[in-house]
Image: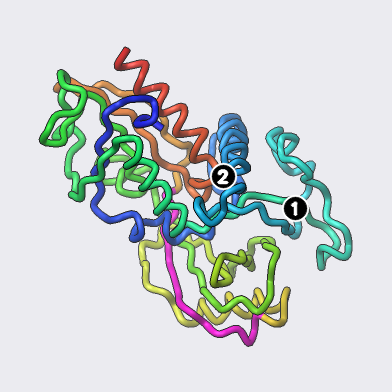
């Protein structure tokens, strides 16, 4: 967004996009494990509108509009943002096993494809991606030059997710791990999410070439190693909803660490040695859901500093 507004943008990243947490995400649009509620709704709906437009080119962008059911969900349990979701309604008995749930047609994003598209869009706007580990925000700041040849900048946007815990440092950001199982799709063309319990939840998302099964939400768990017993339980819970999943061939396993915080940190801060940081992290389990709304606000904060 900054590059397309005409700013010189250089992205520093320890990992390539395909090895980040974003690449693991099941990526169904829905405000999940993110606060503050009074801001999340606007960010989410702004992003929804962008994804609706991108869904017109799914092969290019990786975004599709897909129908599905949130079992156990109730309209009166949602925030004001729900009124802005076209067609969101109570599920019928035929659509929901328990008889109570929500039906919706929502953006579902194939993240490997979407990340490639985003990288190409950044490059087309003149942005540059440079690999490298950042150990200090101050080392990136140059209070004079917009972006200089050695990779320092007048404004640094800190989008480090869970890495902000050490980099800022901010102990308020912590991991909530999610394990997924990828299987051959036995013919499922709708998404599903079930209620959470102590043992985990059941959800599945039909993505190109695979069905993504989940999942878990283990707080303060730093492990990214898949647990075979957890994987078996995930398949079992999903097969209880769609029996054909039980015999689907397993293609792989994934674990991602959601960067959860009591509230998203989106603010501009002056560095002691000069320069500015726009902190932009703590999006929990809804990074994709709020991506475009948060990016617009972050870009506005950068421009407020540079005008």
Q: CA distance from mark 2 to mark 1?
A: 27 Å
Q: Quadrant of residue 51?
A: top right
Magenta-highlighted residues: 245-259
Callout 2: SS:
helix
Relative height, residue 179 to residue 36 (above, below): below
Q: Is residue 114 left or right of residue 13?
A: right
Residue at 34% x, 54% y is 17
Q: Is residue 140 left or right of residue 281?
A: left
Residue at 27% x, 41% y is 11
Task: Name the quarter where the C terminus is drawn.
Answer: top left
Task: Name the quarter where the N terminus is drawn.
Answer: top left
Number of marks drawn: 2
Few, some or many residues within 10 Å of mark 1 (<14, 14–19, 20+)? some
Name the image colouring: rainbow
Residue at 42% x, 30% y is 266
> Is 251 part of what is drawn in magenta?
yes
Q: Residue furthest top?
A: 307
Q: Residue furthest right?
A: 93
> How far from the left and from the top, in percent, is residue 59?
53, 57
Residue at the disc numbered 1: 73
Few, some or many residues within 10 Å of mark 2 (<14, 14–19, 20+)? some
> How far from the left and from the top, in percent, is residue 48?
61, 40
Q: Which mark is residue 144?
A: none
Q: Which mark is residue 54?
A: 2
Is tag 2's residue or tag 1's residue first in the polypeptide sequence? Answer: 2
> How far from the left and from the top, in percent, is residue 45?
62, 35
- Nearest-to-viewer mark from 2 and 1: 2
Callout 1: SS:
loop
């Amino acid at each position: 967004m900054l590059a397309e507004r005409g700013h010189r943008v250089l992205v520093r990243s320890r990992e390539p996009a395909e090895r980040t947490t974003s690449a693991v995400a099941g990526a169904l649009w829905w405000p999940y494990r993110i606060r503050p509620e009074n801001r999340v709704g606007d960010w989410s709906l702004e992003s929804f509108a962008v994804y609706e437009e991108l869904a017109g080119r799914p092969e290019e962008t990786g975004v599709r509009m897909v129908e599905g059911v949130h079992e156990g969900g109730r309209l009166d349990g949602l925030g004001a943002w729900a009124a802005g979701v076209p067609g969101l309604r109570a599920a019928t008995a035929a659509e929901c096993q328990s008889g109570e749930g929500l039906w919706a047609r929502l953006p579902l994003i194939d993240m490997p494809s979407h990340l490639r598209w985003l990288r190409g869009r950044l490059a087309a706007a003149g942005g540059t991606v440079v690999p490298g580990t950042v150990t200090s925000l101050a080392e990136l700041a140059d209070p004079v030059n917009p972006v200089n040849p050695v990779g320092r900048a007048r404004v640094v946007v800190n989008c480090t997710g869970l890495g902000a815990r050490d980099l800022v440092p901010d102990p308020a950001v912590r991991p909530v791990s999610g394990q997924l199982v990828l299987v051959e799709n036995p013919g499922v063309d709708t998404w599903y999410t079930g209620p959470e319990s102590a043992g985990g939840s059941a959800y599945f998302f039909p993505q190109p070439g695979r069905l993504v099964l989940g999942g878990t939400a283990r707080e303060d768990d730093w492990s990214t190693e898949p647990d075979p017993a957890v994987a078996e339980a995930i398949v079992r819970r999903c097969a209880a909803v769609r029996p054909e999943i039980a015999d689907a061939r397993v293609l792989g396993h994934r674990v991602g660490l959601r960067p959860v915080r009591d509230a998203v940190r989106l603010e501009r801060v002056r560095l002691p040695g000069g320069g500015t940081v726009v902190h932009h992290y703590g999006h929990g389990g809804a990074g994709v859901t709020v991506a475009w709304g948060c990016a617009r606000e972050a870009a506005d904060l950068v421009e407020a500093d540079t005008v």
